[in-house]
Amino acid sequence: MAQINPSWPPYFVSHRYQGLRAGSRLIVTAAVHGNEGCGTLAVRRLMAELEQGALALRTGRLTLVPVSNPLAFQLGQRGGERNLNRHLAPSDAPRDYEDHVANWLCPLLAEHEVLLDLHSFQSQGQAFVFLGPRDNAGELEPFALAAQEEALAQRLGVARAVDGWLATYALGVNRRGKTPDGDVRYGVGTTEYMRQQGGWALTLECGQHDDPAAPRVAYQAIVNTLAHLGMMDAQPPAPAPLEALSLYEVVDKLDDGDRFARDWTSFDPVSRGELIGWRADGSPVTALDDGRIVFPNPRSPSGQEWFYLARASSRF
């Protein structure tokens, strides 16, 4: 068991609001990654408006977590000692700071039925929402609440939806073969854990880390979610059209000398066979199919995800 480091933030914080009438149990999380501050700003704005009476919770339970990973947030980096959003689960013998976070956060998630998790990303690009899988009885991520996720996704205020995260991440894990126990569920984070507990969840990627619009995107998504769930006195938002994409491939950086052919932005279109970059030995890396590049990260360390590929989906 890891010793408690005196330099760690000494406690965790969540804020709970309970309406007089029964309703949905919603939790909103931010700063799961410490360098993604847009959700924190949005949550704190909402808290101020609730305290001032500008907004009011009418039904259900709302839990707000402005900083899910305090150490990473304090350091201004993705993780404190590791990535909290990988292999997320409680631990009887916590080995690092994020294990302690999980022992607090996982039971909190399990008390709710809906999760909105607010993130941002490294490269330039427009905000989008990550959904879970379609309803299925498979081994990796069985699910039966896809309709609820799809309905909310169309009302968050973004124009693009992506699925296929866990299956594609598992593909990369199987190739690497060096995660704990070779577990293909290494990609389980907050939303995947929520689904395992019988709930449903969306990850909103609000834009690039430093995009000044990202906190507004995050805030509007929270308000839209509350209205959609009937938790506040507001007109429920109408569904909006979404471009639907499914991840199908993850490409790792194998060497620090691997490099992109140009400055890619998330969701730039790519054609089958198009040059994306070069390996350190000069061999080309090309697109497997027509579609989009997602999360291109020129700063990725070797052995980690370099970029993802997605193709059009008929989900919406």
Image: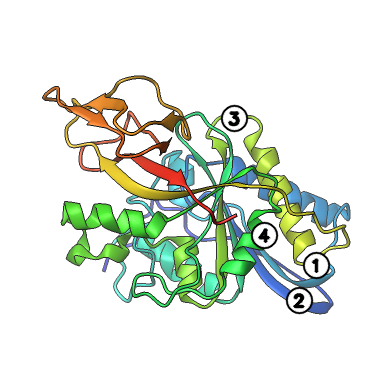
Distance (Cα) linking label 2 and label 4: 16 Å
Q: Quadrant of residue 186?
A: bottom left
Secondary structure of the residue carrying numbered label 4: helix
The number of numbered discs placed on residues in the rendered structure image is 4
Q: Residues within 10 Å of mark 2 (few under 14, many from 20)?
A: some
Neighbourhood count class around disc 3 (C-alpha, 10 Å): few under 14, some 14–19, many 20 upward: some
Q: Nearer the viewer, mark 2 or mark 4?
A: 4
Q: Nearer the viewer, mark 1 or mark 3?
A: 1
The numbered mark at residue 230 is 1
**Label for residue 211?**
3
Q: Which residue is mark 2?
A: 23
Query: Which numbered marker is on residue 286?
Result: none
Name the residue type under label 4: Leu
Q: If the image is split into quadrants, where does the C terminus sit?
A: bottom right
- Report the Cα–Cα distance between label 1 and label 4: 12 Å
According to the picture, the residue beneath numbered tag 4 turns out to be: 152
Disc 2 from disc 3: Cα separation = 34 Å
Residue 97 in the image, given as x and y percentages of width and height: 36, 58
Q: At which x and y percent is residue 307?
A: 34, 38
